[in-house]
Amino acid sequence: MESTHFNRDNLADKLRAHGISPTHQRIEIAYALFSRCEHLSADQVMAIVNERHSESSKATVYNTLNLFLEKNLIREVIVDPNKVFYDPNTSPHYHIYDIESGKLTDIDAADVRVTGLPPLPDGMVTEGMDIVIRVRAADHQA
Amino acid sequence: MESTHFNRDNLADKLRAHGISPTHQRIEIAYALFSRCEHLSADQVMAIVNERHSESSKATVYNTLNLFLEKNLIREVIVDPNKVFYDPNTSPHYHIYDIESGKLTDIDAADVRVTGLPPLPDGMVTEGMDIVIRVRAADHQA
DNA sequence: TTTTCGAATTAGACAGAGTCCAATTCTTAT
DNA sequence: ATAAGAATTGGACTCTGTCTAATTCGAAAA
């Protein structure tokens, strides 16, 4: 099982599997996200993709990230009021957020159990649940 | 116990109790938040406060909301990538977020139990936990 | 009451994230 | 090879939020 190892070729397949035609720019953006398995903001993605030569414009980066979101290739994580993070991990999981460094860490949802939630309002359907644990280095005072 | 009923006078006391000198503008902003018990964005607060006459500038509204946050008079809720909501309810609670209307509803934390969370990384301390249940009207398709 | 001085407020310039648009350039099927 | 549609682009634009320097407020001292 080498499927965790992404290269441009199997990423193109992954895009096609999600109904996305794999253009050069889209593959580079997917590669940025999936090769390093991190939570990246749009401008981090842009910086990575354009490291060597200019590969993608700002508009394309945003278009593509939103397309990936729609097609459920990635998820967005909203913890910082200033920017959205994009998460290449789409399996159910929650997050630990270091409020000082801004670093995000995954928590596998499989082990987590939440009980005592009230019933949803009538005619409403769950789209998902986000849990964010905000943490801080113990020695720093708030 | 009529303490749930806020007027300008007991709001001034509430501000003082949190170490905030109660100016005219601060009281109006507090009144906007606490009289209606809703989740408001900064520009909603500004609109409410300036409904009749112009009472507070944009800078004051932002300064004041951030001051209230620091002094734990209110909390911020980050669910919408576009704007922060300010929450006059500081007792432990979570949120239901209607992704179509943007409406936020409180869930009392007292009944909710979360188990199976991994231990925190070494030297880290919890600042708090946010839970957001994203919902949608059942008939609308995603 | 008047003066004084630090605190609060203000307008408007600014910054950064993200969107929009019309023009250009790629894809791809024929 | 070509035409039609899709993707990409730069740059202008919007929106939320911050900053700054100047003004105004208000409480305490005189």
Image (cartoon, coloured by chain):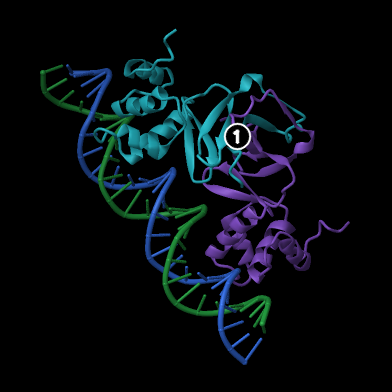
Chain colours: A purple, B cyan, C green, D blue
Pinpoint residue B83: horizontal percent, then vertical percent.
48, 42
Amino acid type at mark 1: Met
Residue at the extreme right of the image, as rendered? A1
SS label for mark 1: strand
Name the side, left or right, on which B27 lies relative to B80: left
Answer whether residue B133 is visible to the viewer in this image: no
Q: Nearer the viewer, residue C8 or A138?
A: C8
Kindly indicate the quadrant of the structure image that contains residue A137: top right
Quadrant of the snapshot with the N terminus of chain A: bottom right
Subunit that carries the residue with mark 1: A
Please count the marks in the image: 1
Residue positioned most to the top: B1
A97 vs A63: above or below? above
Residue B116: x and y in percent read 77, 30
Q: Which residue is at a point 69% across and 68% down the rendered structure image? A: A22
**Residue name at image x 79 percent, y 34 percent:** A111
Q: Is residue B79 visible?
A: yes
Of C11 and C19, nearer the camera is C19
Q: Which residue occupies 70% across, 33% down?
A: B123
The quarter of the rendered structure image containing the C terminus of chain A is top right
Q: Residue at x 25, y 36 (%)?
A: B54
Q: Position of residue B51 (x, y in %)?
A: 29, 34
* Residue C5 in which image quadrant: top left
Which residue in the protein does label 1 denote? A124
Position in image of residue B53 (x %, y %)? 24, 34
Q: Is residue A44 above or below residue C7?
A: below
Mark 1 Cα shell of 10 Å, populated few (<14), some (14-19), many (≥20): some
Q: Nearer the viewer, residue A128 or B58?
A: A128
